Image (tube, rainbow, N blue to C red):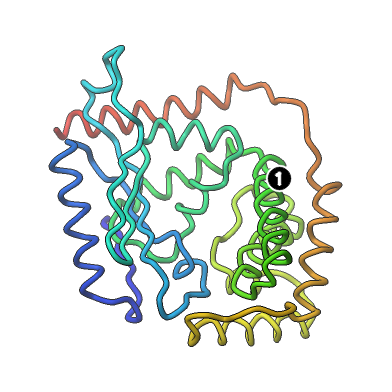
């Protein structure tokens, strides 16, 4: 079943340009785009009037390209044109990063904005992520990202940058409240809805999100106290809640991941 989920708020001209670029990439690079999503602030739930369109995709190359010692690059990067940014990863790269605790692929799988894709592929890859992702490594990915962004927000006194630390902090809270899950939503409003949070925090986030939605430049200043308190508390809690753990026995993880990859590579190769 084909996937497509584009909100009415997105510029149809830009969306058509993304569709055309994805078709060109498949043709010129001889790959199959298995999932293409929006990964930026539009998908995170706090766009500005001038937010970029950040299309990211996972692709599978021809079978022959995997059966050579001289592999091509495992990324496809296109030039930034205006607000349009389109880049993607080979499935091999995406799976290696997933196993190593990188949360980027997980976020792509959870994006509420989908340009194109196969529903079975996304669901199967979500299921694999839940089985092989190390939740402590994923959480520490969010912790490292969030702390870095929080330092930048404080240094530049940037209200816009507050969002880039708030979302990792909310992901950490969600993971703490859902101890059996390794994959958190990427959409900030969904994270808020699925966590037990103080009312003043929810209200402050709503006010700041509304300001960002209508203002190109939010300017500087101190972040609302409930948000600042929440961010610093979540980062402090995460250090103990998600400790560095010894490496797992990777045999089963690699076997499951390799099985998934082979299935996709053979399917695309047979179709080609």
Say left or right for 206 vs 54.
right
- In the image, residue 200 sits, relative to residue 155, either above or below, namely below
- In the image, residue 97 sits, relative to residue 214, either above or below, namely above
The tally of labels here is 1
Say left or right for 158 vs 116.
right
- In the image, residue 192 sits, relative to residue 76, either above or below, namely below
Say left or right for 245 vs 8.
right
> Considering depth in this image, is 80 or 189 the residue closer to the camera?
80
At 51% from the left edge and 53% from the top edge, which residue is drawn?
A: 107
- In the image, residue 139 sits, relative to residue 245, either above or below, namely below
Q: Secondary structure at mark 1?
A: helix
Identify the residue under disc 1: 140
Name the residue furthest top: 69
At 75% from the left edge and 75% from the top edge, which residue is drawn?
A: 227
Classify the position of the C terminus by image quarter. top left
Say left or right for 199 vs 193.
right
- Residue 27 locus on image (x, y percent): 13, 43
At 17% from the left edge and 36% from the top edge, which residue is drawn?
A: 30
Classify the position of the N terminus by image quarter. bottom left
- Residue 258 locus on image (x, y percent): 44, 25
At 70% from the left edge and 80% from the top edge, which residue is drawn?
A: 221
- Residue 120 locus on image (x, y percent): 35, 48
> Considering depth in this image, is 146 or 59 the residue closer to the camera?
146
- Residue 98 locus on image (x, y percent): 53, 38
């Amino acid at each position: 079943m084909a996937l497509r989920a584009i909100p009415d708020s997105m510029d149809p001209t830009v969306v058509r340009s993304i569709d055309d670029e994805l078709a060109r990439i498949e043709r010129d690079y001889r790959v199959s785009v298995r999932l293409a999503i929006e990964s930026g602030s539009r998908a995170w739930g706090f766009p500005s009037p001038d937010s970029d369109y950040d299309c990211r995709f996972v692709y599978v190359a021809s079978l022959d390209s995997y059966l050579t010692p001289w592999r091509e690059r495992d990324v496809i990067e296109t030039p930034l044109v205006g607000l349009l940014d389109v880049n993607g990863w080979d499935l091999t790269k995406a799976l290696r990063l997933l196993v190593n605790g990188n949360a980027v692929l997980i976020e792509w799988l959870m994006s509420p904005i989908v340009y194109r894709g196969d529903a079975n592929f996304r669901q199967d890859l979500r299921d694999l992520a839940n089985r092989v992702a190390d939740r402590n490594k994923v959480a520490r990915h969010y912790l490292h990202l969030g702390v870095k962004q929080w330092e930048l927000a404080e240094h530049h006194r940037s209200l816009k940058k507050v969002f880039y630390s708030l979302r990792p902090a909310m992901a950490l809270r969600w993971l703490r409240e859902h101890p059996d899950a390794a994959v958190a939503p990427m959409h900030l409003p969904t994270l808020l809805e699925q966590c037990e949070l103080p009312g003043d925090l929810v209200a402050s986030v709503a006010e700041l999100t509304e300001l960002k939605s209508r203002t190109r430049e939010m300017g500087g200043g101190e972040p609302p106290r409930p948000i600042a308190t929440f961010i610093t508390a979540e980062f402090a809690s995460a250090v103990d809640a998600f400790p560095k753990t010894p490496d797992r026995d990777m045999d089963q993880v690699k076997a499951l991941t390799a099985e998934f990859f082979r299935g996709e590579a053979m399917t695309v190769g047979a179709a080609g």
